[in-house]
């Protein structure tokens, strides 16, 4: 296939910048449109200084004037659903990075996001390649997963699908970039530096997303509790997954081998050799999810650790992975960079 034309809608934020950073090195892509209503006419490097000398300017076209093979919508929740139908009607495939199309039941979306869904008739494929690769191939609309759910689901799938547990507690710690480019009181440097802040302790809107996917691909009754924390780093999410094994004759080595076999053919999920502990620094800037630190205590409690870059595997990199699958490219095309350790 020759190169495809790509449009990035809402390209002024961190995910838009990451989409450009990665796609500019993708051999099968031409970036033809990058939009920003507030920054129309400016070079992208004004907001994304790592893209200096890139010949792209922000534009603000009408939706009918966006002509692309694939549209990445990096707009906020609620804004994206207003425009996605138009891009689909233009003949584009759409990969939406907001939460607007992640739920099979719009009532769940409306309850947790507090927004009336404008297009419940649109059916999207949940864009986690490790579970939906075949559906992604033929999809016109992809709901790119949330950053927290990506690490949480990948850390849970093998034990849930094999019904080794029926209850999971997820403790996730995220870098400040997960809050987006717009500053607020919680991300103000004196607030978040030298500090760890739990938030949305029992009601984070990514909780039902994690539950739905784990129940779809495993135990329909599995219970999931999720609490996020803001930590003073820029990138990354590390998730500590706690659960109690239902069987007493399963060892930590058994679980480790289960994960190794389960993800053996996945290009971006790495179950660490010798069960090493994943590090945020090891996945920074990459599309990899590392899993390790698999341990059992003397009360049969299982612990599994996962680490991702929230802006790459947790957002833009995964979106490009989905694009590669949709257009029949090598799934790893443009995404082979290793983490930026240290």
Image: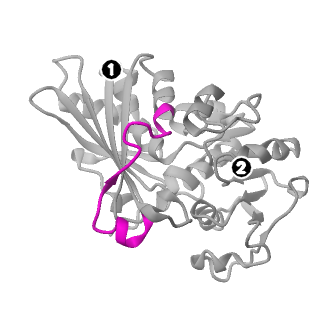
Q: Which residue is painted at 51% across and 34% down in the image?
A: 209
Tell me residue 108's x, y (percent): 58, 28
Tell me residue 159's x, y (percent): 34, 26
Q: Which of the pair 187/284 is nearer the observer? A: 187
Q: Is residue 338 visible?
A: no
Q: Quadrant of residue 325?
A: top right
Residue 264 lies in the magenta stretch: no
Disc 1/disc 2 C-alpha distance (Å): 36 Å
Q: Is residue 187 visible?
A: yes
Q: In the picture shown, does residue 295 fall above or below 96?
A: above
| First along the sequence among labels 1 and 2 | 2
Q: Nearer the viewer, mark 1 or mark 2?
A: 2
- Image side of residue 199 versus residue 69, left or right: left
Residue on which the image places disc 2: 79
Residue on which the image places disc 1: 166
- Other residues around mark 2 within 10 Å, as few (<14) / some (14–19) / many (≥20): few
Q: In the picture shown, does residue 41 fall above or below 194?
A: below
**Which labelled disc corresponds to residue 148?**
none
Secondary structure beneath disc 2? loop
Residue 205 lies in the magenta stretch: yes
User: What residue occupies the far right of the structure in this picture?
Assistant: 64
Q: Which residue is painted at 73% across and 58% down in the image?
A: 9
The C terminus: image quadrant? bottom left
- Image side of residue 164 versus residue 323, left or right: left
Q: Which of the pair 185/212 is nearer the observer? A: 185
Query: What residue span does the magenta drawing correspond to?
Result: 187-208
Secondary structure beneath disc 1? loop
């Amino acid at each position: 296939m020759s190169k495809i034309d790509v449009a990035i809608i809402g390209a002024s934020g961190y995910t838009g910048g990451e989409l450009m950073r990665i796609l500019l090195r993708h051999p099968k892509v031409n970036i033809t449109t990058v939009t920003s209503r507030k920054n129309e006419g400016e070079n992208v490097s004004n907001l994304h200084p790592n893209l200096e000398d890139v010949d792209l300017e922000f534009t603000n076209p009408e939706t009918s004037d966006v002509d692309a093979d694939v549209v990445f919508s990096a707009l906020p929740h609620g804004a994206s659903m207003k425009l996605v139908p138009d891009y689909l009607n233009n003949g584009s495939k759409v990969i939406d990075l907001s939460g607007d199309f992640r739920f099979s039941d719009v009532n769940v979306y409306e309850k947790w996001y507090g927004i009336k869904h404008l297009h419940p008739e649109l059916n999207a494929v949940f864009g986690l390649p490790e579970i939906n690769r075949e559906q992604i191939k033929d999809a016109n609309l992809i709901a790119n997963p949330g950053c927290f759910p990506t690490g949480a689901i990948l850390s849970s799938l093998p034990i849930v699908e094999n019904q080794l547990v029926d209850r999971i507690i997820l403790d996730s710690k995220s870098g400040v970039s997960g809050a987006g480019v717009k500053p607020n009181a919680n991300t103000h440097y004196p607030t978040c530096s030298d500090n760890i802040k739990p938030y949305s302790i029992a009601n984070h809107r990514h909780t039902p997303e994690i539950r739905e996917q784990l129940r779809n691909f495993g135990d329909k009754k599995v219970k999931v509790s999720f609490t996020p924390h803001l930590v003073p780093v820029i990138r990354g999410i590390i998730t500590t997954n706690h659960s109690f094994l239902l069987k007493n004759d399963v060892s930590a080595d058994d679980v480790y081998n289960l994960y190794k076999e389960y993800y053996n053919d996945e290009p971006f999920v790495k179950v660490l050799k010798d069960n090493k502990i994943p590090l945020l620094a090891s996945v920074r800037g990459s599309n990899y999810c590392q899993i390790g630190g698999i341990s059992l205590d003397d009360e049969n409690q299982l612990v599994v650790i996962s680490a991702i870059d929230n802006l790459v595997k947790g957002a833009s990199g995964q979106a490009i992975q989905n694009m590669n699958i949709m257009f029949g490219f090598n799934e790893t095309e443009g995404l082979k960079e290793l983490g930026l350790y240290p």
